[in-house]
Image (cartoon, grey):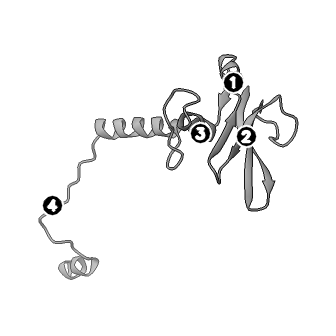
Amino acid sequence: MLKIKLARIGKKKSPTYRLIISEVGRDPYGRILENLGNYNPRTKDLQVKAERINYWLSQGAQMTITVNNLLVGHKIITGNIIKIRGQQPALDQNKDKKQESDQANPIISEVNPSAPPQSENDEAKKEE
């Protein structure tokens, strides 16, 4: 599977990135199929080959979440921004299933909420 991703280039503490397309398991600093553009995060400058990105997407290439958000933010492609922090989209589906099962099987507590909590010492005194 092909993926459009960022490969870091530039000096120490002065990053710039290349938008590249390569196979999923391949090192982003090794052999790439095509260089699709550059991104400078300090100046927020994005230079891309929009027609080549659309071509690779039409061929079935995927994007990383960061590249998707970057291209959607600069209106190169249409779509939704994906949240990076928190749980990934695949994990959210599992969470929804868990919540549905929790709603289907509610746990009934036999504790009286108005009664004060009892400690172990109180129970020992009652037994004597």
From the viewer's perspective, is 58 left or right of 116? right
User: Mark 4 touching mark 3, by CB under 8 A?
Assistant: no
Q: Nearer the viewer, residue 96 or 126?
A: 96
Residue kind at label 2, given as amino acid type? Asn
Question: Which residue sits at x=36%, y=40%?
Answer: 99
Q: Nearer the viewer, residue 70 or 87?
A: 70
The CA span between labels 1 and 2 is 18 Å
Q: Tell me if mark 1 has few (under 14), some (14-19) or many (20+) residues whose alpha carbon lies within 10 angstroms of its own.
A: some
Identify the residue position indicated by label 3 in the image.
Answer: 70
The CA span between labels 3 and 2 is 12 Å
From the viewer's perspective, is 5 left or right of 96? right
The CA span between labels 1 and 3 is 16 Å
Q: Tell me if mark 3 has few (under 14), some (14-19) or many (20+) residues whose alpha carbon lies within 10 angstroms of its own.
A: some
Identify the residue position indicated by label 2 in the image.
Answer: 38
Instruction: Answer with mark 4 or mark 3, whichever residue precedes in sequence.
Output: 3
For label 1, the SS is loop
Instruction: Answer with mark 1 or mark 2, whichever residue precedes in sequence.
Output: 2
Q: Residue 102's x, y, as percent?
A: 33, 41
Badge nearest the viewer, 3 or 2: 2
The CA span between labels 4 and 3 is 53 Å
Q: Residue 63's x, y, as percent?
A: 65, 32
Question: Which residue sits at x=66%, y=40%?
Answer: 46
Query: Quarter of the image containing the N terminus?
Result: top right
For label 4, the SS is loop
Q: Indicate which disc residue 32 carries.
A: none
User: Mark 1 touching mark 2, by CB under 8 A?
Assistant: no
Question: Which residue sits at x=26%, y=81%?
Answer: 121
Vertical side of 82 occupied by 8: above or below: below
Residue kind at label 4, given as amino acid type? Asn
